[in-house]
Amino acid sequence: MRWSALAWKNLSGGWRRALSVGSFTFLAGFFMVCFICFIDSVKTNMETAVINALSGEIRLAPMGAEEEDIFSLSGSWEDTKYLTKEQINSAERILKEKINSVETVKRVRHNVLLISDTSETGGMILGIEPHATAYRKVLSLSAGRYIENDYEVILTETQAEALEVGVGDVLGVLAQTKAGYNVDNALTVVGIGSVDLLNLFGYNVAYTDLRSAGELMGLAEGEATDVILYTGDPQQITEVKTLLATALTGQQVAVTTWRQTGGFIMGGLHFLSILYYSFTVILLFIIGVLLINIISMILLERREEIGTLRAIGFGRWRIAWLFLLEIALLTAFFCLLGVGAGSGLVLFLGRKTLEVPPPINYLTGKSFRLIYNPVRVLPVIGIICGVTLAVAFFPVCRAAKVKPVELLQEKN
């Protein structure tokens, strides 16, 4: 307690010096909190978009398709695996017995050629049941409506532009069935939209009804390529997956989570994590270099004070401890201010949805809301304080070695 009081007294006596050090820790805490919350928000929103747009939280798929990239359009059409009606019925019985899912949806994914009067383009179609609602949370329509009936399709804005079609136009669709036969169909465009957060990854999936997609793939009624589950609680995904995998043993049905089948988009999410850690390291390095210089200059100004303390009996390590305590108190105070200011700004901005202009909206989406996560924010205080004390240790210990006789010689 006595040491702390002495440290505060020294700080209050040289508040200008204290402010020069404290300002850096304040800015470091402020910017780190803002950046962490921004990256966390972008990553969380992208994960939600991946789950709702295509992958689901948990996916039941044919055995052998566990690690399949569901965003990939590579491979032959007839190579696509599917679940039989018996497998799906058995899985649905187990689902009703074991878990209470928020939404369970059969889906058919297939590669097709979309043909208009003026152009054609290849892409993936995703057949969904009419009662499916998850995809509507992330698919923003610029025109039209969502799927309600058979033989309807929702195109992405990129596809509609390439095909030069609008709502109400009829498209020809050419595909190859699982048996290798060519088949065509006609679908009416009922909507045009995009999944904003996945535009950065070239997400170009057309949504259609389950019956149309099944016919294009040559599936019988009741068959599908996937059964998608939404548990309503992301924290239980791993637990539910293990439970279902055990219950479905012997059914030739693979159980995977969205992290296993997210494909190349998962690489984009990992990149955001790398970006965060890189920013943190660079920021801390810059702060560390600047603090070493500032602390060294302050200690140089206080050489006479250090010599006086040595003359009245203070040892080298007691002086070093006193100065490190000053720096720790100063850093903690200003870091808390910076983290508090950054948290306040994030919480204030997070109260409303922000409209983001291009090109930033490729990363955030057209509508963006900041998410505050205290679990990620609180460690910032420890990191900044630890780095500051680490970079201050060497110059403090070096300055504490000064002897009174050396100061007398310098004055003479």
Image (tube, grey):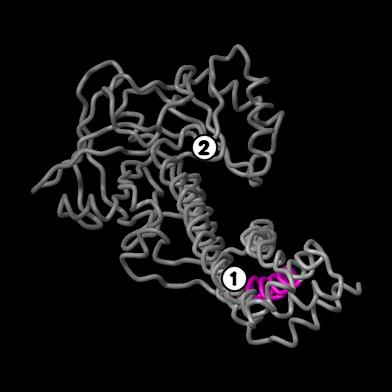
**Looking at the image, is 359 positioned above or below residue 136?**
below
Secondary structure, magenta segment, majority class: helix
Residue 89, image quadrant: top right
Mark 2 to mark 1 CA distance (whole Å): 52 Å
Give the quarter of the figure containing the C terminus: bottom right
Taking 78 as reference, is 345 left or right? right
- In percent of width and height, residue 347 lies at 62, 72
Q: Crowding at label 1, few (<14), some or many (≥20) Cα neighbours within 10 Å?
A: some
Residue 233 in view, yes or no: yes
Q: Which mark is residue 393?
A: none
Is 62 situated above or below 118? above
- In the rendered image, the residue lying farthest to the top is 250
Range covered by the magenta-colored residues: 326-347
In magenta segment, residue 386: no
Q: Check residue 330 for magenta coloring.
A: yes
Q: Earlier in the sequence, mark 2 or mark 1?
A: 2
Q: Is residue 331 above or below residue 374?
A: below
Q: Are marks 2 and 1 in contact (CB under 8 Å)?
A: no
The residue at 52%/37% (across/down) is: 258
Name the image quarter holding residue 15: bottom right
Q: Which numbered circle lies on residue 258?
A: 2
Report whether residue 374 is seen: no
Three-letter code for the amino acid on which mark 2 is drawn: Trp
Q: Element type at marker 2?
A: helix
Q: Nearer the viewer, mark 2 or mark 1?
A: 1
Picture coordinates of residue 404, whole percent (x, y)? 74, 74
Q: Is 272 placed left or right of 348 in the picture? A: left
